[in-house]
Image (tube, helix red, strand yellow):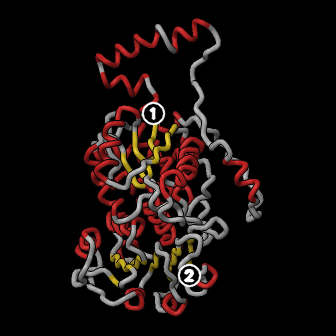
Amino acid sequence: MTTVSDHQNTSDSAPAQATPNAELTHEEIFGAHEGGKLAIAPTAALTSPRDLSIAYTPGVAKVSRAINADQTLASRYTWTSGLVAVVSDGTAVLGLGDIGPRASLPVMEGKAALFKNFAGLDSIPLVLDTTDNDEIVETLVRLRPSFGAVNLEDVAAPRCFDLERRLVEALDCPVMHDDQHGTAVVTLAALRNACRLSGRDFGSLRVVISGAGAAGVACAEILEAAGVGEVVVADSRGVIHPGRDNLTPIKAELAERTNPRHVTGGLPEALRGADVLIGVSAGTIPEELVKTMADDAVVFALSNPDPEIHPEVAARHASVVATGRSDFPNQINNVLAFPGIFKGALHAGSRMISDRMKVAAAEAIAAVASEELAADHIVPSPLDPRVAPEVADAVAEAARQDGVATA
């Protein structure tokens, strides 16, 4: 069987790295963004009249007629089979919040550049000047012939949950909200390896997630799918449980699926004796609460730019600590996940990105890091060239096992 990595068309060498923690200058940043970070280049030679006749008229008409007769040929004779639409409404951009579509465009261009660099995938940033889910769904349905997959980016919760669900139902192609599932996949990979180091049984873990936004909900879902023993989720009002009032529909679903011991109260009650803390909130968690966790606990403080608890403080009580930052060990970085996930899904001709495919991606990421496993190395470097091909192969195989692959 041909593997996805056999078609990898990016360099096997990692990009050159700047001096770690070197201060970024205003001129350096704005100079790199001037004119944008993307360009379109032809893949066919256009240096002679014959080249023009093949690539454009009259030759192109034969290809268009063939596609008209057999719509499936579009994936072979156009770039759509490897094209990702990076879609945002600009309502939850990085740590900047609702800054609108135009201000979000540099981020979407950056995401498209990451797709190309790490997975060899072309992508088009599409920033939409609407926050109406009906309008976004209708727009992408009408644009469907132009792309092969949709990466939702920086859409605010709770609207992002409904938008992703509706797009998955409306489009016959892979759709993933990376702020949810990219974070969740890498978190699962890191937790797998943290358990290997600490000798913990994955199925008996007690996990507390602080934060019930996009990433928090997705982390809870993937941990349950992967077989974690107990997941308790807390938001700014306390632990989510069926007895709480004013729960959103998403949080009401969480209340039914999580917290099997029916813990009530807040983080003090949830963290007592817990094995794992996953912070995906904008709040802070005092050292006194981490002290109450189980011995040799695992702490993932993923809020950016300020972790819920400083990693050096967390390390006084935890055997493994991770953050979302590049200047501390164990960065939980979505770039470990999304390039390979979309590469594998597109290669397999998958109609969707299933739970099995996400878990397979996490296992592949964990396997790469396990070769040099240590407390300060539970996930690979975001620049490790092995990651995207391994993830893509695992995701494509999972799509075939799920019966959602067409290639």
Type of amino acid under label 1: Thr
Expressed as whole percent of the image width and height from the top left, the position of residue 106 reads: 58, 50
Q: Mark 2: which secondary structure?
A: loop
Residue holding disc 2: 309
Position of 15 compared to 153: left or right?
A: right
In-front residue for pair 3/133: 133
The answer to whether residue 22 is above or below residue 170 is below
Q: Position of residue 12 (x, y in %)?
A: 64, 41
Is residue 227 positioned above or below 48 on the image?
below
The front one of 112 and 97 is 97
Which percent across, then down, holds residue 3? 46, 37
Q: Which residue is mark 1?
A: 2
Q: CA distance from mark 2 to mark 1?
A: 45 Å
Question: In the rendering, at what x and y percent does residue 227 appear?
Answer: 33, 67
Identify the image quadrant of the C terminus. top left
Quadrant for the N terminus, please: top left
Q: Secondary structure at mark 1?
A: loop
* Residue at point 75%, 53% (across, down): 28
Sequence order check, earlier mark of 2 and 1: 1
Task: Identify which amino acid the numbered label 2 is placed on.
Answer: Ile
Q: Residue at x 39, y 28 (%)?
A: 75
Tag 1: Cα neighbours inside 10 Å, few (<14), some, or many (≥20)?
few
Residue 362 appears in the picture as rendered? no
Q: Using residue 196 as the reference point, say whether residue 45 is left or right of it.
A: right
